[in-house]
Amino acid sequence: MVKPIIELKKHMCKMKLTKILIFLLAFWLEPLSAAPYFSFKKYQVEDGLSHNTVWCAIQDSYGFIWLGTSDGLNRYDGQGNKVYRNALNEDYSLESNFVETLFEDGQRIWVGTNSGLYIYDRETGRFSRFNSTTSYGVSVSSEVKKVIKAKDGKIWIGTLGQGIFIYDPEREVLIQNSSQTSFLWDICVGNDGLIYTASLQEGLLCFDENGKFLQAYEVSPFMDASDSHKINCVQNVDGEIWVGADVNLLYHLNKQTGVLEHYTTSLNFGAIRCLLKYSEQELLVGTDNGLYLFNRITNTFRRGDNPFDSRSLSDQTINAMMWDAEGALWVMTNLGGVNYMPKESKRFDYYSPATLPGVLSAGKVVGPFCENKEGNIWIGTRNGLCFFDSVTGELSEYSIGGDKNLKLDIRSLLLDDNKLWVGTER
């Protein structure tokens, strides 16, 4: 039976809908709030990944995605995966399968492992150990956390145990600097050409391109004594240096004052493990407890993933993040493999029982949709009518005829000027 039972009010229609709304068939009975969480595809051991603990990733100049794991190096071409591991009686394989950092330099891929540094030659398909030594006979033999190239072309190698190595490929000269710290977690290059390092012992350190120590930046006043000076990551974002620490703390280096400005939050996400630019205003913050976004304008955090959503991250501990050439986001996790968010998915807001709990009770079937000129949406269900306000993101149950107990099985909706025609089962 179809009849015009609702006279629409103009104040209920405010805005043209620009995104597609996706509703699941079941919702929770809690207050409604529409927060656009990220949704991911997963790539794990059952899909061909060598190990579900993924430490690092790069996309090379040929488009391949390289993934360093706790058990092998993976090269993914979009369809299949090739795994590189140590092979017995083979002289040109990796000696260690525990891959922590990757860096491309021309035809070579530098592979940092838990027991030294290796170079993959693309032309020969072979791995060789980086055996250069300093003038004192010291080689890179400890755990390699980061490899980068400075603006002058020198290769910086950060280690846990041996400090910093700087390699000049033109002169084939290797020097070591462990006077300030022996334990490095991360390195980045500033727009000014200076090198910033995250140290286990001394916090944030700054060097010039030749390896001369310039300055240490204090982080301990905002950390517990047990945390010492430990910071996990340092990232150059639009020329600004950002630092992630172990205790819900994000830092920004104010170069004018020489002070590390800190940002705190009531959100309990533990250690900040990695940082990545998301937009002109926001940073992606990878933590021990999920993915967050930090607004650089308002200095506020918000959650980017929903742990109760099956389309969310496969593991809450994030080791690394990167954008690929097509604008897709790759998130490397500690136990859940790789999470991949295509660029196209950012065009949608995804609504699920976890992200939009509320008036639609569990098990209620969602039926027809009807959008008005202003972009608000009427939604028919097997137990009544709902209204989605595209301005506020709120979903409310609409009482037909003022009777809240009347639960109609709605099968069709049609908008005619300011009247909504509702077709029911009977």
Image (cartoon, grey):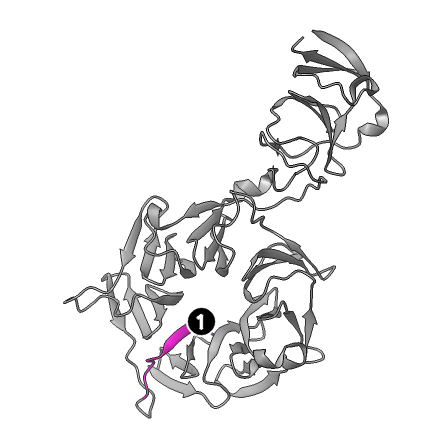
Q: Which residues are magenta?
A: 138-151
Query: What percent of the width, then of the height, locates residue 24?
Result: 58, 32
Q: Residue at x 38, y 50 (%)?
A: 44
Residue 418 visible in image: no
Q: Which residue is mark 1?
A: 148
Query: What percent of the width, then of the height, locates residue 13?
Result: 80, 28
Q: Residue at x 39, y 86 (%)?
A: 175
Of all residues shown, which one is farthest toward the left? 89
Asked where in the image residue 256 lies, by quadrant, the reply is bottom right
Query: What percent of the width, then of the height, locates residue 89?
Result: 14, 67
Of all residues shown, which one is farthest toward the bottom? 136
Horizontal side of 405 relative to 154 (left or right) equals right
Q: Residue at x 51, y 43 (%)?
A: 310
Residue 254 visible in image: yes
Give the amino acid type for the residue marked by disc 1 in the picture: Ile
Horizontal side of 79 relative to 183 (left or right) equals left
Categorize mark 1 by other alpha carbons within 10 Å: few (<14), some (14-19), many (20+): many
Asked where in the image residue 259 lies, by quadrant, the reply is bottom right
